[in-house]
Amino acid sequence: MILWLLVALPLVVGGVLLVAGHPADRLAPALCVGSAALTAVLAVVAAITRPDVSAPLLAGLRVGLAVDGLSAVMVITVTVILVAVLVFASAELGADESRARFHGLMLVFAGAMLVTVCARDLVVLLMAWEVMGACSYALIGFWWRETRRVDSGTIALLTTRSADLGLYLAAGAALAGGVGGLTLAGLPEAAASWRDVIAAGIVLAAIGKSAQLPFSFWLSRAMGGPSPVSALLHSATMVAAGAYLLVRVEPLLASTGWAADVVAWIGVSTAVVLGAVALVQRDLKQVLAASTCSQIGFMVLAAGAGGPAAGTGQLVAHAATKCLLFLGAGAWLLALDTKDLDRLRGAARRSPFLGVVFTIGALSLAGVPPLSIWVSKDAVLASALADSPALYVAGLAAALLSGAYVGRVLALLWLPTEAALTTRLRPLLLAPLPVLAAAAVLLGIGGLPGPAAWFADLVGGGPPMAAPNVGELLVSGVVAVVGVVAAGVWTRSRPTLSGSRNRVLADWLRLERVTDLVVARPTMRLASSLARFDDHVVDGGVRLAAATGTALGRLADVRVEWSIEGAVRGVARTARALGRLVPKAQTGQLHQYYAQAAVALGVLAVLLMIL
């Protein structure tokens, strides 16, 4: 019962708000925050009691939800982040906004994520996966009167939907491979040939959802949505869903002999390349978006390197940290009406409280000791080192870049300035930030030997999070600090930002343009060609057949029906003529009858002689 309530509460309340529309705008923020808080309580109860429920869907197929160690961590993370984001949103959105629609979509979005993390089979997972995609489109394009925002939502939807086809491929292959009930736990037991197809489909869907290379560009466009949307989407839902799925199916990846290596290299490549992309962005939210791709890359690396506990720890630490940073960026956007780093110079000095909590989150993101991501990231790097030294070196390079883009941003935010805030921020808007900052600091405790071993056992499998030794922790910490300090010094010595000199990186490797040229335009040309073929060949053939049938019908009407009708009329006329002649022979005079008989006999005799 608890599990049904956990997933039903946000879905039902969100659905009611969406149906109610504008009349519910005034009530929506309080109702939404209250529902989210109750959902968080239910999540804690579910994490303790570990419920397992199922229901029949089709004959011989039962689908269900379950809370195990991994999903227990996730449901608490998702719901706590949801509460923080919705408190911020209730203070940010004005009375003139469609607050019922916004809060309804946020609840449904979060509810779909809860179903995703609790799903124990591919059928339920697919349902929730689709709802998340639809809600992301609606939330990114929330301000639908602005064409670019709607286009951004469309690009995000189409990109992730294209990758989502892999999940359908995986479900079909699991069915063909004999996976009973299409359960996630049963995927490694599929027939060998089908197991490879299942793994390929899941990897495709997961890296698309988590904006890993080459799908990363959609996350840049997702910044068109409101700041609370970015905070929720980047921290505990949507983008995290792909990494979570890879961690969940880590036994499947390991069983194929190739999928784990592919996933690990995709993750570490994204961590490095998108770290470089973040380093040259001129927009604060774009820096955070690129850093999300990079940090999610560490989680994907952990799934491929056989460290599910490390990947989960990174996911949780990153969720708190990135939610803090996006809400902080949203607060500055409200206060200063800008996301441009040039115009944000000195913003931290204008609002010291906001500057301090944002700095805590940023240093955690960089992996600076002793903050949370330092420990969780090192657990990932330890798993990578055990799998391949090359992966470990690449991971350190990504860690250095993390420090560099954080150092660059902080240097700009703390530059001396005499300007003041243009808008006073409401206390309710800032209320979630110190809580998230505390989480960004204290979650590092999970990396200590005792808690790390317990956490690894809770998640189930893989090396413990305490795997990195003291030397590895020191190396990682030094790399992060060097990155932050070097980038900060470099930025302070330059009067202008240098992002414009790195056009390819600044434009996210031009992946959107490449996708447009390589995929979108050829697809549209093919679609246009098929449409012309349909119009001129298929449809033309149908029209020609119809015209030919009509012509033959008219010909039959003129040549055949008229001829038959004439013959019938001739027979009728002949019959009528004979009918008129017969009475004339019936005169009643006997000698005429004898004469007629004599003539008839004579004609008969002639015929006999001829024949």
Image: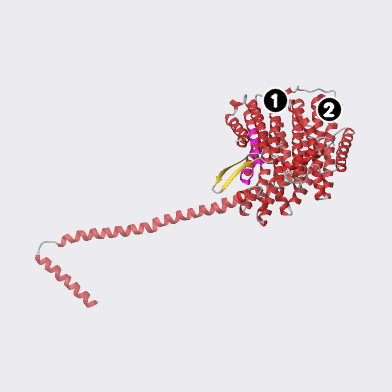
Magenta stretch containing residue 151, yes or no? no
Figure quadrant of residue 382: top right
Three-letter code for the amino acid on which mark 1 is drawn: Ala
- If the image is split into quadrants, where does the N terminus sit? top right
Q: Is 597 placed above or below 32 here?
A: below
Q: CA distance from mark 2 to mark 1?
A: 24 Å
**Dot 2 surroundings within 10 Å: few (below 14), some, or many (20 or more)?**
many
Front residue (pair 555, 11): 11
Q: Viewed as shown, does residue 534 lie left or right of 447?
A: left
Looking at the rendered structure, the secondary structure element under dot 1 is helix
Q: Which residues are magenta?
A: 106-124
The answer to whether any part of residue 576 appears in the image is yes
Query: Residue 176, how many percent across, how many down?
Result: 61, 54
The residue that label 1 is drawn on is: 91
Label at residue 346: 2
Q: Viewed as shown, does residue 168 lie left or right of 477?
A: left
Three-letter code for the amino acid on which mark 2 is drawn: Gly
Query: Residue 609, how many percent across, how many down?
Result: 22, 77
